[in-house]
Image: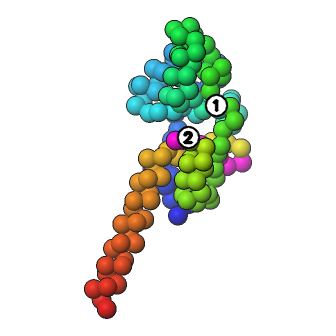
Amino acid sequence: MTIAHILAEKGGSVVTTTPDRTLDEAIHLLAEKRIGALVVSNPDGSVAGIISERDIMRALAERGGGAFDAPVSAHMTADVVTCARATTVEDVMQMMTKGRFRHVPVCEAGRLVGLISIGDVVKSRIAAVEAEHKALRDYITMA
Protein backbone atom coordinates (compact mmCIF):
# COMPACT_ATOMS: atom_id res chain seq x y z
CA MET A 1 0.00 0.00 0.00
CA THR A 2 1.24 3.50 -0.77
CA ILE A 3 0.95 6.83 1.00
CA ALA A 4 -1.44 7.91 -1.77
CA HIS A 5 -4.00 5.44 -0.39
CA ILE A 6 -3.78 6.96 3.08
CA LEU A 7 -4.06 10.51 1.72
CA ALA A 8 -7.06 9.51 -0.40
CA GLU A 9 -8.81 8.43 2.80
CA LYS A 10 -7.71 11.16 5.20
CA GLY A 11 -7.22 14.05 2.77
CA GLY A 12 -4.28 16.29 2.08
CA SER A 13 -5.12 19.12 4.43
CA VAL A 14 -2.10 20.12 6.53
CA VAL A 15 -1.91 22.72 9.28
CA THR A 16 1.15 24.86 8.65
CA THR A 17 2.94 27.83 10.10
CA THR A 18 5.67 30.13 8.87
CA PRO A 19 9.25 30.34 10.16
CA ASP A 20 8.76 33.85 11.55
CA ARG A 21 5.79 33.01 13.81
CA THR A 22 6.59 32.76 17.51
CA LEU A 23 6.79 29.55 19.47
CA ASP A 24 3.88 30.85 21.56
CA GLU A 25 1.73 31.16 18.42
CA ALA A 26 2.74 27.65 17.34
CA ILE A 27 1.82 26.21 20.75
CA HIS A 28 -1.62 27.81 20.60
CA LEU A 29 -2.19 26.53 17.05
CA LEU A 30 -1.20 23.00 18.09
CA ALA A 31 -3.60 23.16 21.03
CA GLU A 32 -6.43 24.66 18.98
CA LYS A 33 -6.14 22.00 16.26
CA ARG A 34 -5.37 19.20 18.76
CA ILE A 35 -2.35 18.02 16.77
CA GLY A 36 1.26 17.13 17.58
CA ALA A 37 3.22 18.90 14.85
CA LEU A 38 3.12 21.78 12.39
CA VAL A 39 4.80 21.82 9.03
CA VAL A 40 6.76 25.04 8.67
CA SER A 41 6.33 26.23 5.11
CA ASN A 42 7.95 28.84 2.92
CA PRO A 43 5.83 31.30 0.93
CA ASP A 44 6.30 29.16 -2.21
CA GLY A 45 4.72 26.13 -0.50
CA SER A 46 7.96 24.25 0.05
CA VAL A 47 8.79 22.70 3.42
CA ALA A 48 11.15 24.80 5.55
CA GLY A 49 10.93 22.51 8.56
CA ILE A 50 8.66 20.89 11.10
CA ILE A 51 7.98 21.86 14.70
CA SER A 52 6.68 19.18 17.02
CA GLU A 53 5.69 19.03 20.66
CA ARG A 54 9.09 17.46 21.33
CA ASP A 55 10.88 20.41 19.70
CA ILE A 56 8.88 22.81 21.86
CA MET A 57 9.67 20.89 25.05
CA ARG A 58 13.38 20.98 24.21
CA ALA A 59 13.19 24.74 23.58
CA LEU A 60 11.47 25.32 26.92
CA ALA A 61 14.01 23.12 28.73
CA GLU A 62 16.89 25.08 27.17
CA ARG A 63 15.54 28.64 27.30
CA GLY A 64 12.69 28.60 29.79
CA GLY A 65 9.92 31.15 29.32
CA GLY A 66 12.12 33.19 26.96
CA ALA A 67 11.51 30.56 24.29
CA PHE A 68 7.89 31.66 23.85
CA ASP A 69 8.94 34.82 21.95
CA ALA A 70 11.51 33.04 19.76
CA PRO A 71 10.67 32.42 16.11
CA VAL A 72 9.63 28.90 15.12
CA SER A 73 12.69 28.78 12.85
CA ALA A 74 14.97 28.84 15.90
CA HIS A 75 13.59 25.57 17.24
CA MET A 76 12.11 23.67 14.30
CA THR A 77 13.70 20.61 12.75
CA ALA A 78 15.05 22.02 9.50
CA ASP A 79 16.41 18.79 8.03
CA VAL A 80 13.03 17.20 7.41
CA VAL A 81 12.60 13.70 6.03
CA THR A 82 9.79 13.72 3.48
CA CYS A 83 8.13 11.13 1.29
CA ALA A 84 6.09 11.07 -1.92
CA ARG A 85 2.62 9.74 -2.63
CA ALA A 86 4.21 6.69 -4.28
CA THR A 87 6.21 5.79 -1.16
CA THR A 88 5.06 2.57 0.48
CA VAL A 89 3.64 2.51 3.98
CA GLU A 90 6.36 0.01 4.92
CA ASP A 91 9.07 2.45 3.79
CA VAL A 92 7.53 5.27 5.84
CA MET A 93 7.35 2.95 8.89
CA GLN A 94 11.07 2.26 8.50
CA MET A 95 11.85 5.99 8.13
CA MET A 96 9.90 6.80 11.29
CA THR A 97 11.46 3.98 13.28
CA LYS A 98 15.01 4.73 12.15
CA GLY A 99 14.68 8.50 12.56
CA ARG A 100 12.59 8.34 15.75
CA PHE A 101 9.98 10.82 14.54
CA ARG A 102 6.20 10.61 14.25
CA HIS A 103 5.32 12.88 11.32
CA VAL A 104 6.41 12.82 7.66
CA PRO A 105 5.43 15.56 5.21
CA VAL A 106 4.36 14.30 1.79
CA CYS A 107 5.82 16.36 -1.05
CA GLU A 108 5.47 16.34 -4.83
CA ALA A 109 7.54 18.58 -7.09
CA GLY A 110 8.92 20.37 -4.02
CA ARG A 111 5.48 21.30 -2.67
CA LEU A 112 3.64 20.02 0.40
CA VAL A 113 0.65 17.80 -0.49
CA GLY A 114 -0.05 16.04 2.81
CA LEU A 115 1.22 14.84 6.17
CA ILE A 116 1.45 11.27 7.45
CA SER A 117 1.52 10.55 11.17
CA ILE A 118 2.47 7.40 13.02
CA GLY A 119 -1.23 7.00 13.79
CA ASP A 120 -2.05 6.97 10.07
CA VAL A 121 0.63 4.33 9.47
CA VAL A 122 -0.56 2.12 12.34
CA LYS A 123 -4.19 2.41 11.25
CA SER A 124 -3.23 1.43 7.70
CA ARG A 125 -1.12 -1.51 8.86
CA ILE A 126 -3.89 -2.80 11.15
CA ALA A 127 -6.41 -2.61 8.29
CA ALA A 128 -4.02 -4.57 6.03
CA VAL A 129 -3.46 -7.28 8.66
CA GLU A 130 -7.21 -7.58 9.29
CA ALA A 131 -7.86 -7.92 5.54
CA GLU A 132 -5.20 -10.64 5.28
CA HIS A 133 -6.70 -12.42 8.29
CA LYS A 134 -10.19 -12.31 6.77
CA ALA A 135 -8.91 -13.57 3.41
CA LEU A 136 -7.17 -16.49 5.09
CA ARG A 137 -10.27 -17.36 7.12
CA ASP A 138 -12.42 -17.20 3.99
CA TYR A 139 -9.93 -19.39 2.14
CA ILE A 140 -9.87 -21.99 4.92
CA THR A 141 -13.67 -22.16 5.21
CA MET A 142 -14.00 -22.57 1.43
CA ALA A 143 -11.55 -25.47 1.31
The one nearer the camera, 78 or 18, is 78
Q: Are marks 1 and 2 in contact (CB under 8 Å)?
A: yes
Left or right of 113? Residue 132 is: left
Q: Position of residue 71 (x, y in %)?
A: 62, 16
| Residue 18 figure quarter | top right
The amino acid pointed to by label 1 is Thr
The one nearer the camera, 108 or 31, is 31
Left or right of 105? Residue 44 is: right
Q: Residue at x 46, y 27 (%)?
A: 30
Helix, strand or loop at disc 2?
A: loop
The one nearer the camera, 91 or 1, is 91
Q: Residue at x 51, y 33 (%)?
A: 37
Asked if the magenta segment contains residue 82, the reply would be no
The residue under label 1 is: 77
**Is 140 placed above or below 91 here?**
below
The number of numbered discs placed on residues in the rendered structure image is 2
Q: Is residue 80 visible?
A: yes
Q: Position of residue 72 (x, y in %)?
A: 61, 21
The amino acid pointed to by label 2 is Phe
Query: Dot 2 surroundings within 10 Å: few (below 14), some, or many (20 or more)?
Result: some
- What secondary structure characterizes most of the magenta part? strand
Q: Residue at x 64, y 52 (%)?
A: 84
Structural distance between the alpha carbons of marks 1 and 2: 11 Å
Q: Which mark is residue 101?
A: 2
Q: Position of residue 95 (x, y in %)?
A: 60, 50
Q: Residue furthest bottom?
A: 143
The residue stretch that appears in magenta: 101-109
Q: Residue at x 42, y 30 (%)?
A: 33
